């Protein structure tokens, strides 16, 4: 296994992985925009090029098998003594490569980068539908600190 930083040449595969993740976690309550794939590709491209983001890709024999997208955020509202946090935005490993510690190694690499930057805490979120990922985060030292509730005011047609 090799882990390396994503570059613009990885745009198509990262977009494909992210689309798979979105569809895997989709609970059907919200409808995708007609230009979902194009908008997703534009967003991923901006993330790859952003100095605030770190996207890493895991490869086996030169073939991408997973990735992690992360960023840092400053919430300088004056409430916290340390307003900078790390965020794991996306984490995907192809089903055939799960249970082989690819996700753990991707996460450890991102956490190391955050530590080197002086970032003291990391947050992530995942959908209620993605039950198995909760145990992954817990096994890696993450604990739940918030919940998101949703009410659909106008059901999709």
Image: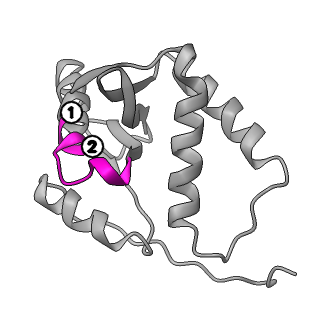
Residue at the image position 32 percent from the left and 37 percent from the top:
85
Residue 56 visible (yes or no): no
> Mark 2, residues whose alpha carbon is within 10 Å: few (<14), some, or many (≥20)?
some
User: Do labels 2 and 1 touch, CB within 8 Å?
Assistant: yes
Distance between mark 2 and mark 1 Cα atoms: 8 Å
User: Against 88, is 33 above or below?
Assistant: below
Of residue 129 and residue 151, the one placed in the foreground of this image is: 129
Q: Residue furthest front?
A: 61
What is the span of residues highlighted in magenta in the rendered image?
A: 94-105
In the picture, the quarter occupied by the N terminus is top left
Q: Secondary structure at mark 1?
A: helix
Taking the spot 35% from the left edge, 68% from the top edge, the residue there is 146
Drawn side of residue 97 relative to residue 38, left or right:
left
Q: Position of residue 64 (x, y in %)?
A: 40, 30
Q: Is residue 11 left or right of residue 70?
A: right
- Residue in the image at 17% along x and 34% along y: 108
Q: Which residue is mark 2?
A: 122
Q: Position of residue 123 (x, y in %)?
A: 32, 49
Location of residue 6 in the rendering, given as x and y in whole percent from the top left corner: 44, 20
- Disc 2 on helix, strand or loop? strand
Q: Which mark is residue 111?
A: 1
Q: Is residue 153 left or right of residue 137?
A: right
In the rendered image, residue 28 lying in the magenta stretch gets the answer: no
Is residue 151 something that shows in the picture? yes
The way the protein has been coloured in the rendering is one colour
> Which quadrant would the C terminus be assigned to in this image?
bottom right
**Mark 2 / mark 1, whichever is N-terminal:** 1
Q: Relative to 102, is 42 above or below?
A: above
Q: Which residue does the image show at 59% across and 48% down from the upper left?
A: 19
The residue nearer to you, when weighing 28 against 2, is 2
């Amino acid at each position: 296994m090799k882990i390396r930083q994503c570059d613009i040449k990885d745009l198509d595969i990262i977009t494909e992985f992210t689309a798979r993740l979105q569809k895997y976690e989709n609970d059907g309550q919200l409808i995708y925009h007609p230009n979902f794939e194009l908008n997703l590709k534009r967003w991923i491209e901006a993330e790859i090029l952003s100095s605030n983001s770190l996207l890493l890709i895991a490869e086996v024999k030169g073939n991408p098998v997973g990735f992690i997208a992360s960023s840092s955020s400053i919430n300088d509202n004056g409430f916290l003594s340390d307003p900078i946090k790390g965020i794991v935005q996306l984490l995907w490993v192809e089903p055939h490569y799960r249970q082989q510690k690819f996700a753990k190694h991707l996460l450890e690499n991102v956490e190391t980068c955050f530590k080197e930057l002086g970032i003291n805490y990391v947050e992530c979120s995942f959908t209620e539908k993605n039950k198995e990922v909760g145990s992954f985060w817990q096994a890696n030292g993450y604990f739940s600190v918030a919940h998101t509730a949703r009410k659909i005011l106008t059901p999709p047609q």
